[in-house]
Every structure is written in structure tokens, then in C-alpha cells.
Amino acid sequence: MTLHEEIRELAAERNAVILAHNYQWSDVQDVADFVGDSLGLSLEAQSTPADTIVFCGVHFMAESAKVLNPTKKVLLPNLAAGCSLADSITAASLTEWKERYPDHTVVTYVNSTAEVKALSDICCTSANAVSVVRSLPNDKILFTPDRNLGRWVAEQVPEKTVVIYDGCCPIHDIMRGADMRKTIEAAGKDTIVIAHPECRQDVVELADEVCSTTAMMGVPAKYPEAKTFIIATENGIIHQLRKRYPGREFVMADGCIGCRLHCPYMKVTTLEDVKNALVNLEHEVTVPEDDLVGARRSLERMLAVPRDN
Ligand code: 13P
């Protein structure tokens, strides 16, 4: 029996659902019941009838699954799956910012801990950030922790004043417009550029489409004439794009087969880890009761807002 088959058998025995983010290794994506972006995974976690959720992503995502469905057992196959963006804001630093901007509504990207979500008014993902900010009655927004997503949202919603925290995802923030221009030139005519809104402004300005990873999956269908797509996000997304559009060419935006666009946290989880998670029912994610209630309020408010894309 292959490792993939063993995992599927174990998942059935345990009545477990395997959720995987678009940035996971391709063999981990292939063993999952559902592959998606942060928003899609939260919705799946919220509605799953399974007893156990094996979350192949990073810690904050598994924590959100627990917050949204606290009676389920949520397992993170590898405890080293952190997120440097989530770590860039703490409860203490957010409290200090809230004191500096007391009349602002706090919008927090889901790439944050449950403790930080609990101190926020509402969450957002890259798939609904613009709609979330637009939906708020207050015109003064404190956006945390991603400065690039915050800038993108502020541009789309100019009627609001958006104060932006100074965190970033190093994988997206490393890309530069100058490199992107070279990649576009090398790709030639009929090329479409797709960028994640966590990219810097000089990269986003060169993009034809700016969207979440799952929304990226729909882009090639919108451009039937385009031959090549340049992708400015973590390299795991290429697997799903190639599966869905076998005749199209996908090129990573860093011009070096995505070696710089490789998230060490997303890629720490292996197929072996997924099997061990199911065999040993490890590592169970827990959220302190104090954070759970507030984080759930912020996440549920977000889920009531429709997707941007
Ligand atoms: P998505 O919202 O597309 O899942 O992106 C999540 C993320 O962490 C990007 O770095």
C-alpha cells in the first residue's frame, strides 16, 4: 500500500477530514479532501461533519479551525508550522496600537494568533479584505498586521482612512517590480501576471489580476488566449494551476523557478507527518477559552461578508 493509500484509509477509520492550503507540498495537497485558500479552509472547517480535522497549513489556520468548530479535534501534523507574519503582532503590540487609535475599527488579517483576533473587531483574508473594510460603518480603520495587504485595501477603498501596521510576509515582500519586469520580458507576448495582495506595490502595479490563491485558480479561464501566466505568490499554488490547466504555462515571478517563493513554514509538513497525525492523533491544537470567544466573534463577523473574488 502506498503512503497516500495508508493515509486515506486512516482518515476513513478516524472519521477525519484532511484540509490543505494551496501552499502545501503537492503530495500533501493530493491526499487532502479539500485544498483551498484561508477563507475556503475556514468555511470547510466550520461546516465539516468529521470528528477530526487534520490541518495541513500553518498554526494560525489550524487555530482558526478550532475556534470555528471547538467541539472537533483539530490536529496540526507538524508543530514547526508557524507563520512569521502572524508572529509580527502580539496582543501587547495591538493593545498599544488600539490605545493610539482609539476611535478606529480594528481589521485583522487571519494570519494572526487567536489572542490577537480576540482583541480585533473583525478578521479578513486576502479573499474578502476589501469587502470587509467596505462593510464597516466606521471610516477609520486600523489594519493589522500585513502592510502590503493593508495598502492594497486602502487603495481599493479610498473613502476610508486606513492606518496600517508594519508587518509583512517575507515570501511576498521579497519580490520586486524590477525582477518582475525581467520575468515579463522573458515570457514574451500573451502573458498574464497574477499577484497576491501581500506583494509590494511595485509588483502589484505590474499585475493583471490581484487576488487570493483560490481566486487565482479561476484566472486562466478568464484569459483563453493567454499562453503564459506569471504567478507572484508562494510556489505551492503552481501544482493546482497545472492540474486544472494542463495546456498552459505557469512561471514563478522570481524568475528562478520559485526558489525564493518557498515558505519554509508551509513546506515543513510532509506526507509522513500527516500519517503520524492520524496514527497518534497528534498534535492537538487548543485555544484558551478567553481567546476563543473573542476570536470566534471576529471570524464569524468576517464569514458573514461575501468574498471579493
Ligand atoms: P490566501 O488567503 O490566498 O490563502 O493566502 C494566505 C497566505 O497566507 C498568503 O501568504
Image: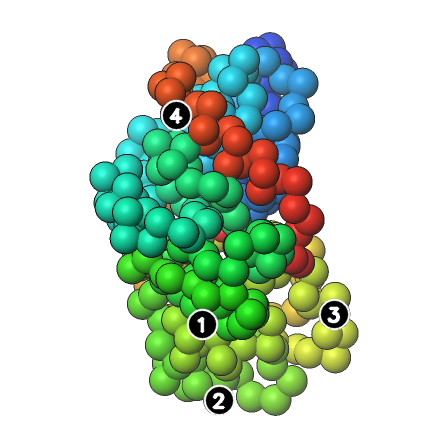
302 relative to 115, above or below: below
Label 3 crowding class (10 Å Cα cut-off): few <14, some 14-19, many 20+?
few
Q: What amino acid is labelled 4 in the image? A: Asp
- The mark nearer the N terminus, 2 or 4, is 2
Q: Which of marks 1 and 2 is nearer the N terminus?
A: 2
Which quarter of the picture shows residue 288? Answer: top left
User: Mark 3, mark 1: which one is toward the viewer?
Assistant: 3
The residues bearing labels 1 and 2 have C-alpha atoms spaced at a distance of: 12 Å
SS of the residue under disc 1: loop
Q: Name the residue under label 1.
A: 253
Label 3 vs 1, first from the N-terminus: 3
Residue 277 visible (yes or no): yes
**Mark 2 Cα-neighbour bin, 10 Å: few <14, some 14–19, many ≥20:** few
> Identity of the amino acid at label 3?
Lys
Gap in Å between the C-alphas at discs 3 and 1? 20 Å
Residue under circle 2? 185
Q: Mark 4 points at which residue?
A: 291
Kindly check if marks 3 and 2 are in contact, taking CB atoms under 8 A apart as contact.
no
Ligand 1 near label 3 (Cβ, under 8 Å)? Answer: no
* Residue 46: percent from left, percent from top: 61, 28
Which mark's residue is nearer the viewer, 3 or 2?
3
Numbered disc 3: secondary structure: helix
